[in-house]
Image (cartoon, rainbow, N blue to C red):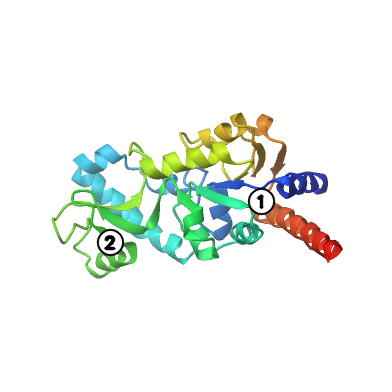
Amino acid sequence: MEEAIKRAADLLERSRKVVAFTGAGISTESGIPDFRSPGGIWEKYEPVYYQDFLESGEARRRYWLRSRATYPVLRDAEPNPTHLALVELEKMGKLDCIVTQNIDRLHHKAGNLPEKIIEIHGNSAFAVCLNCRRIYPREEIQKILEENDGIEVPHCIRCKGFLKDATISFGQPMPEEETNEAMRRARACDLMLTLGSSLVVYPAAYLPRYAHEAGAKLIIINMTATPLDHLAGVVIHGKTGEVLRQIVEEVGIRQSALNVERS
């Protein structure tokens, strides 16, 4: 582990344009349950596909039953050492952007600049009317659901259209602007940090491939093996919070020593 951390620090130290690609593995360290793992959200709540949401009142009811129960967990979660290490990386001037599959907004809460964060699966902070596209703070919708037991499915106050969390459901098109920007950044970086992602959810999992094909180095940190481990310059199986913190601290120590030498 120590040798791998030093090799990762070497790559990070030499890089000038780093893209961090983050997945659910970093959110679990903040107490947010994984969707797919044993004991995850899908074991308790059956996933609702986007087309079913549009066509079925029962599907919409099940969707909002799950959302009402899970939203407080996302709202109250706090950043962990992975998020804070990425803030430090930004302060060092190395972080080009964060491309995240996560909907929890913990990168924002940690202090990364909003313009550095690309949310390719949307986020849980808002709900949107699927008819007129009016946006609502998600906390406002939560209060309506909790204070009015007769309301199971919220509707737009402007046009009475269906409201849905501003997240991407199964079968729902990916956000075009964010997806295109994520692909552009992946192909332009010189190092991609892949953090807490199983790299099996597509099209998001194409991004490290795009970076590698364009000549970037890959560092993969995840609890378990991924299909792209063979492409990476460094692979570390462990908690991202513990591992990335050590890597960024090592780079910081080297930078401080270099500054002392120059002065």
Q: Amino acid at mark 2?
A: Tyr
Work out whether residue 149 can be spotted: yes
- Mark 2 lies on a secondary structure that is strand
Question: Quick one: 18 or 231, which is closer to the camera?
Answer: 18
Please identify, in this view, whether the residue under mark 2 or under mark 1 is nearer the observer: 2
Tell me if 214 is positioned left or right of 242 in this view.
Answer: left
Residue picked out by circle 2: 136
Question: Quick one: 100 or 114, which is closer to the camera?
Answer: 114
Tell me if 261 is positioned left or right of 218 in this view.
Answer: right
Residue 218's spot in the image, x, y percent? 66, 38
Residue at horizontal 49 percent and vertical 38 percent from the top: 183
Label annotation for residue 239: 1
Specify few, some or many for label 2: CA neighbours under 10 Å numbering under 14, 14-19, or 20 or more. Answer: some
Residue 79's spot in the image, x, y percent? 56, 63
Question: Quick one: 175 or 195, which is closer to the camera?
Answer: 175
Tell me if 170 is positioned left or right of 255 in this view.
Answer: left
Residue at horizontal 33 percent and vertical 59 percent from the top: 126
Residue 23's spot in the image, x, y percent? 53, 46
Quadrant where the C terminus sits is: bottom right
